[in-house]
Amino acid sequence: MHEWNFMVMLPAGHDLPSLSNIHVLSAAFFMGLAAAAPMGPVNMMAMRHGLAGGWRHTLACGVGSVTGDLSLFALALLGGHFLLHGLSNPALRIVLEAIGVILLFPAGAYFIALALKDPTKAFNSARKRWGGGSVPAHLAGEAAQAAGLTIFNPLTILYWISVTSNWLLFADPILGSNAPGWGILMTGAGLITWFAALIVAVRFIPHGARAVFFRLVNAIFGLVLLGFATFCAIVLSSHFLR
């Protein structure tokens, strides 16, 4: 987080506390927006499912991701240093990194292979799969999957611990005991704003271009997963090469 400077020149009649409140609440909003915007696994999953199954699937992924992010933010507000201390444990980090390598490499390879296939065939196959069964069950499963991808991502955990500790430094003197509530509200607004924009984007992509765009999303999704897996493998290998 960048440091925020509240020592501004104010014209006569302007209220410094109210301006400080605007800074604090805006910072929380952009914290949420910055957490949601990077093109990571959750965003790519939301776009992929939305293209094949409709905007409701993007909405479900967004609900799961927002829930996961706000849960981490709330935990960080209550005591993020405990989470950070746990992640610094070498044994726990080795286990998390090994799980990342085992799970992410095959998943990344699968989506790269899917991107190399005929885009129309892959797209129609995905639509057929999501078209069967109960729609509410599909949506609930996608929301849970997005929440899991968010909550169990070590980089996301570290992000929330870092930005929350910085935000509280200047939010607490201004908002006092109301800081956690306002923080969760404004951070949630930032997260929701991003996924609302994503839903609009998915909704208005021309149907004729969806199969090709689906192929592109699969390729990016696969590369993102392989990137995370490679990072985990490099960090994991460093434990054994010392």
Image (spheres, rainbow, N blue to C red):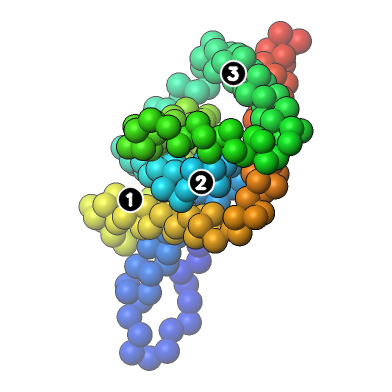
Tag 1 residue: 184
Regarding residue 2, the answer to whether it shows in the image is no
Which residue lies most toward the bottom here? 12
The earlier-in-sequence mark between 2 and 1 is 2
Regarding residue 106, the answer to whether it shows in the image is yes
Badge 2 amino acid: Gly
Asked which quadrant contains residue 2, the reply is: bottom right
Within 10 Å of disc 2 (Cα), the crowding (few <14, some 14-19, many 20+) is many
Residue 47 in the image, given as x and y percentages of width and height:
55, 46
Q: At x 34% / y 67%, what residue is drawn?
A: 21
Q: At x 63% / y 24%, what residue is drawn?
A: 107
What is the C-alpha distance between the residues marked 1 and 3?
Answer: 31 Å
Nearest the eye: 38 or 63 = 63
Within 10 Å of disc 3 (Cα), the crowding (few <14, some 14-19, many 20+) is few
Mark in front: 1 vs 3? 3
Tag 3 residue: 103
Asked which quadrant contains residue 237, the reply is: top right
The earlier-in-sequence mark between 2 and 3 is 2
Image height of 242 relative to 143, above or below: above
Tag 2 residue: 50
Secondary structure of the residue carrying tag 1 is helix
Residue 155 in the image, given as x and y percentages of width and height:
55, 34
What is the C-alpha distance between the residues marked 2 and 3?
Answer: 23 Å
Q: At x 54% / y 43%, what residue is drawn?
A: 52
Counting every numbered tag in the picture gives: 3
What is the C-alpha distance between the residues marked 2 and 1?
Answer: 27 Å
